[in-house]
Amino acid sequence: MTVTKNNTEKVLNINNVNPLIKNVEYAVRGKLAIRAEEIRTDLEAGKGNYGFSKVVSCNIGNPQQLNQAPITFFRQVASLCDNPDLLKKENLPLVSQLYPSDSIARAQTLLHSIGSVGAYSHSQGVPHIRNTVAQFIQERDGHAADASHIFLTQGASSGVQTLLSMLTQNEKSGIMIPIPQYPLYSASLALYGATPVNYYLDEATGWSLDINQLTESVTSARKQGTDVRALVIINPGNPTGQCLTADNVRDIITFCHEQRLVLLADEVYQTNIYEPEARPFVSFKKALMDHPDAEVREGVELVSFHSISKGMVGECGRRGGYFECVNLDSLVLEQIYKMSSVSLCPNLHGQILVDLMCNPPRLGDASYESYSGEIKTIYESLVRRSKKLEGVFNEMEGVSCQAAQGSMYLFPQVTLSDKVAAAAAKESMAPDAFYSHAMLEATGVCVVPGSGFGQKANTWHFRSTFLPEEHLFDQFCSDLEKFHSSFLEKYRD
Amino acid sequence: MIRSLIRTTKTSCVQLNQRNIRYSSTKHGKVLNVNTMHPLIKNVEYAVRGALPIRAEALSAQLKKDPSKLNFDKVVFCNIGNPQQLNQKPITFFRQVASLCENPELLKAENRGLVSKLYPADAIARAELLMKNIGSIGAYTHSKGITHIRENVAKFIERRDGYPAEPENIYLTQGASEGVQKVIQLLTHNTKSGIMIPIPQYPLYSATLSLVDAAPVPYYLNEKEDWGLDPAELKRSVTEARKNGVNVCALVIINPGNPTGQCLSEENIREIIRFCHEERIVLLADEVYQTNIYQPERRPFHSLKKVLMSMGPEYSEQELFSFHSTSKGMVGECGRRGGYFECVNIDPEIMDQVYKISSISLCPNVHGQIMVDLMTNPPVEGDESYPQYRAEMDAIFQSLSRRAIKLAKCFNNLEGVTCNEAEGAMYLFPQITLPPKAIEAAKEKKMTADSFYALSMLDSTGVCVIPGSGFGQEPGTYHFRSTFLPEEHLFDGFCAGLQDFHKSFMDKYRD
């Protein structure tokens, strides 16, 4: 940026801003979501002429925005941690009328280790909470976890960005990402000036992952001079919802060993599992530790990510999560620590929720019944809604939709006519964006066009959550059906 | 046990792993190792949580297991402005409101009888108002932060400065640090991009510039003039950098200063704004300590925004980002990670880009946002909680003032040590004169002399401070930064311990 004497031009302007930032796109909160917010503001102010009375945000996995109730025990513990006056002896008679004894006990335990939720903690997160996470991982997988290799983070996103920035040196650095993928990955790679190396999931077979696809993708990228260093797996998938089989997981690990790739396992939807018999969740850590080949077990570098934002917990606004490092170089771990220390620490409330998520009430605890009842209610409702919406999509003309084996989304494929393509081109939009915009303006429902996630060329999709409240769900579905029919009529060739 | 500390004068990165083997990309080496990782990350240094605090943590752990070998019974963390770690009490009203927002059961009508015995009515009312505008604290919010809260921040800025503020130009962030990093990322392209930073400075700035591979352009504060800022020094710095081909695009001002604590006079601020206008430089105003003001008559806080707005139409296009935080002041809610920045005169297309990168991390955590609301919109005269709020704030403020003066006096009484008073912030940054024998001993251990001194202090007293080399200092001088946050009733013991240590250190290394 040279010093110009042109006093009408801003010093910081679109021509001299960091060029990498200009390339970044994050459709989940892109144009459509921005327009949805405008409409919402209009509706609140009584302005505009819309055919609907509210905006339904199906663009983002944000359950509590759509009135999913928080887990009572978790909020009780967190509020006690926030207001330690409630734990004073003189207040206990009153407080025990509002709080169950196990929530009081848990808050006391947590505060004993934390001190104050207003203090910066250790940059990796409070040691007691990391121990809880290690314990959780051990119970889940049957293999020990090392608390010193666990980092608590502000949501899983923050951890993913840390690892991606560690792993990429320059524009030749490549990271394999699934197509379709959650655009945190493509956006972060754009921000760091590194190369996404795409591998395609197969829609026709339930978005399955073929190892041959992986091999083809990495081989071709390396031939072109890309220094491919890592493989991102999202399991359960986002936006696609597929759950990998145990064989698949094991083969992916073998693949990473053979191809010398670091494995990044995004497992934030690990409790959103809708076909638990056919497709249970298999953690990459477990599969790695169970791998028959010792060289693989001790060699494959794995980072697994989890979050409090998803599952049945849905505490997105709190920004909590963690990642576990397995077989990483100890000098690299020091560097990760150093990077974490510059932002000081993840917020304490997010850390507390990680503790609660990983160590919820157990059988025999005062709050166990209420806890497990709430989890079950939310889970069963998610299963019902996922099936219902999938059915609705599959009934629509020219639409096909794979079942959601996991996560919170459906990713239907929409066949759009040439007329649509032409109309979209006139607005400088992709056809699926054009379709999604029309849906928003007609129904108030905000989804995200498939082009925001990546898709096979000349196919069109959109991602919708199935989170709208159950008692409004039938209306929601019928609004979509009505919109779709009229849209097709309008643009029939 | 940590075996070796500082390797070179530049780094303060601790080598915890004794192996220190360089792996190459052979079949049996790690894929991700210090040679294949992002090279810029290796250059990043953040002394505030570097070698000294890492050693302090290890000593703290040792005290629990085997205290007999150590000369002290607790570690005192004076390395970081983390008041509630040293038992500063939180503001009661703030915690009451936050806990009501946390647990919506408490706001239900059927519980009102019990809850009003535990919570004042105004806390309940505020929580209800916030919940009406938030929905659930468990939901992602708007990526700029909740609109209602940004509106309150805008009102706060207007009350403080007397000039309007626009909620759409305000971004809530996870601490001020997150906002600083975003803005620096926007401003810098490559190694030729340069940002002016004060020496000494808070190493978030130097660390972030290392990370984006841009050039820090240092300007020196004048220790003899209470760490004053001379516009001629700004001019020297930018001219030299530009001569060397650096595209200097921004100036960081930390006011009140960190580690130095100085508060800029209004005239000084006007000079800075004139400088930025002439040189076509964006201003970054780190004002997180704006309520830690210990000489309010002589050196009150002037926000850069207010001064800018008062300077008339010629300067009306000066681009400014101002940063604030819930971690400092008397609020001290560091662990909540709350803050904001205000964009003044920023290009609308840039505002879109700021929005876009904020959206990838979705939103700042809601508890941090709530704390921003409470900090900028606290109880006012007439509110039920006002007397308690006022009393708590005043008590913390007066205690900070007393401890600032006491510690400065203690330092000034040490042999070879001079210390400017803290006009603001939470730190003192004394200059130490070390005897040649000490400097030799440091060299032998491959440390900077101030690191050697600080490490000796830690090992003898359990007090952890940060060597001046972590902040930058005039070459040939040595300093350390200490907070004055240890609890007041322990303060005399704390000062006496430091005096004893310093005397024996000087005796040991005296010529």
Image (cartoon, coloured by chain):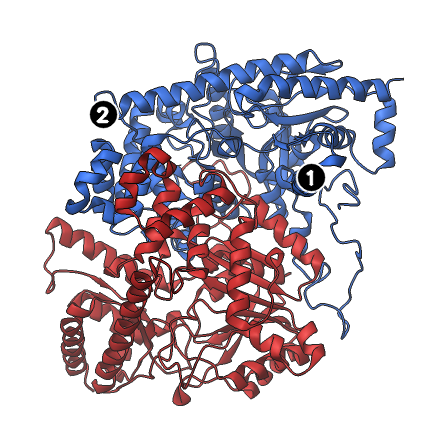
Chain colours: A red, B blue
**In the rendered image, which residue does mark 2 sit on?**
B384
Image: B41 above or below A362: above
Whole-angstrom CA distance, mark 1 to mark 2, is: 45 Å
Q: Which chain carries label 1?
A: B
The image shows residue A26 at horizontal and vertical percentages of 40, 62
The image shows residue B429 at horizontal and vertical percentages of 63, 23
Amino acid type of the residue that numbered disc 1 sits on in the rendered structure: Leu
- How many numbered dots are placed on residues in this image? 2
Mark before the other along the chain sequence, 1 or 2: 1
Q: Mark 2 lies on which chain?
A: B
Give the side of residue A441 with respect to residue B423, left or right: left
Q: Of the residues tagged 1 and 2, which is closer to the observer?
A: 1
Residue A145 or residue B466, whichever sits in front: A145
Q: Residue B59 carries which label?
A: 1
Dot 2 falls on a residue whose secondary structure is loop
Image: B83 above or below A376: above
Residue B318 or residue B65, whichever sits in front: B65
Circle 1 crowding by C-alpha within 10 Å: few under 14, some 14–19, many from 20: many
Residue B438 or residue B448, whichever sits in front: B438
The image shows residue A457 at horizontal and vertical percentages of 41, 82
Corner quadrant of residue A261: bottom right
Give the side of residue A154 with respect to residue A56, left or right: right
Circle 2 crowding by C-alpha within 10 Å: few under 14, some 14–19, many from 20: some
